[in-house]
Amino acid sequence: MKTRVTKMISAMLVLAAFAMVSCGGKNSKEIKIGSVNPLSGEAATYGTSTKNSVELATAEWNAAGGINGKQIKLIVEDDKADPAEGATVFRKLIEQDKVVAIIGGITSRVALAAAPVANDAKIPLITPTATNEKVTQIGEYVFRSCFIDPFQGKVMAKYVAETMGLKNAGIIFDVGNDYSKGLSETFTKSFETFGGKIVAAEGYPSGTTDFKAQLTKIVQAKPACLYIPAYYSDVGLITKQARELGFKGTFVGVDGWDSSDLVKIGGDSVEGGIFTNHYSKDDASAVVQSFVKKYTEKYGAAPDALAALAYDATNILYDSIKRAGNTKPEAIRDALKATDLACVGGQIKFDEFRNPVKSAVIIEMKGGQQVYKATANP
């Protein structure tokens, strides 16, 4: 009889423990966090950088005891840089994995499609790198650790007009990408404000690999520079084809250029190109150099801006959960709003639209490497 009773009690305890874990009960020893990155597809190098940094920061927090005594369980998903896939994996993380917050998406078009899923479910989301200004307008549970496109578009327009002294420009942009279209519009408006003139503007469909029809029209207009608000995979092809068509001006661009594959694709054609970015590994500050050292030692290469932004986003989120004292969505959201944290990208606080107020840097491609040029403050 004792044996039978003992077995019954043991079985009941096992079932109770299973139910507690399955329901994410108060005694759960882990905090589930989703990480959504483009690990395949046209922006795969972005996903590698962001995933690396999220995992690096998570390992550091877990080694230091986790958050409020609980270990962090990171659940990584691939959105393939596809908006529909992004929305699908967000639902999976929320409905099946029961995450309490999500880091991602990485590209603006994925974030625009997936953020409503998180916001509607009241699951806090912080995107490291989605710069389209509409992303955080989706709702009060959506945050970011990067500056927004209107800022970087204005920064580059001012730099081209005032520092470079160029008064006419061409633009080529992806008509199927809100990130690319928005930056094209911002640069145009700002450049004209600074006394410049857009002499040619050509759009191309997403997925294009032959840009010669658009570039022929642009080259004929003889712009002093060509603004390319696109991802590295397009930029390398555009610059190469533009040089083949005889374009002699300067290529200028955006944070989407930041990839080790840019030179692999574009070769010498990207030499002298100038673009806006979120940080420079050459920044001498202790916070930056500490991060660069840790990342390089772990992954064998210096971190790009996407890695820096993902590291910041992860630390901002975990710090907020720690300060919240629990994993209730409203508590995490409110703690995120109150952020005041020293990060790789500077001292981070959020404005009323949950965007960080921070600087941009100007980068030039020299000898196949990124070289710091200047810093532009808000």
Image (spheres, rainbow, N blue to C red):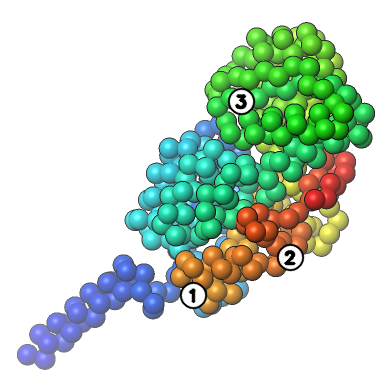
Residue for point 63% across, 20% down: 203
Q: Is residue 377 visible?
A: yes
Distance of mark 2 from mark 1, alpha carbons?
22 Å
* Residue 50 image position (x, y, % from top left): 60, 48
- Say what amino acid the circle numbered 2 marks: Ala
* Residue marked by disc 1: 326
Q: Quadrant of residue 345?
A: bottom right
Asked which secondary structure carries label 1, the reply is loop
In the rendered image, the vertical position of residue 172 relative to residue 34, given as above or below? above
Using residue 217 as the reference point, say whether residue 89 is left or right of it: left
Q: Is residue 103 visible?
A: no
Q: Earlier in the sequence, mark 2 or mark 3?
A: 3
* Residue marked by disc 3: 174
Q: Quadrant of the N terminus?
A: bottom left
* Residue marked by disc 2: 342
Residue for point 29% across, 76% down: 17
* Residue 244 image position (x, y, % from top left): 75, 11
- Say what amino acid the circle numbered 1 marks: Asn
Distance of mark 2 from mark 3, alpha carbons?
35 Å
* Residue 247 image position (x, y, % from top left): 80, 14
Tell me whether circle 2 and circle 1 mark residues in contact (CB < 8 Å): no
Using residue 173 as the reference point, say whether residue 38 is left or right of it: left
Asked which secondary structure carries label 2, the reply is strand
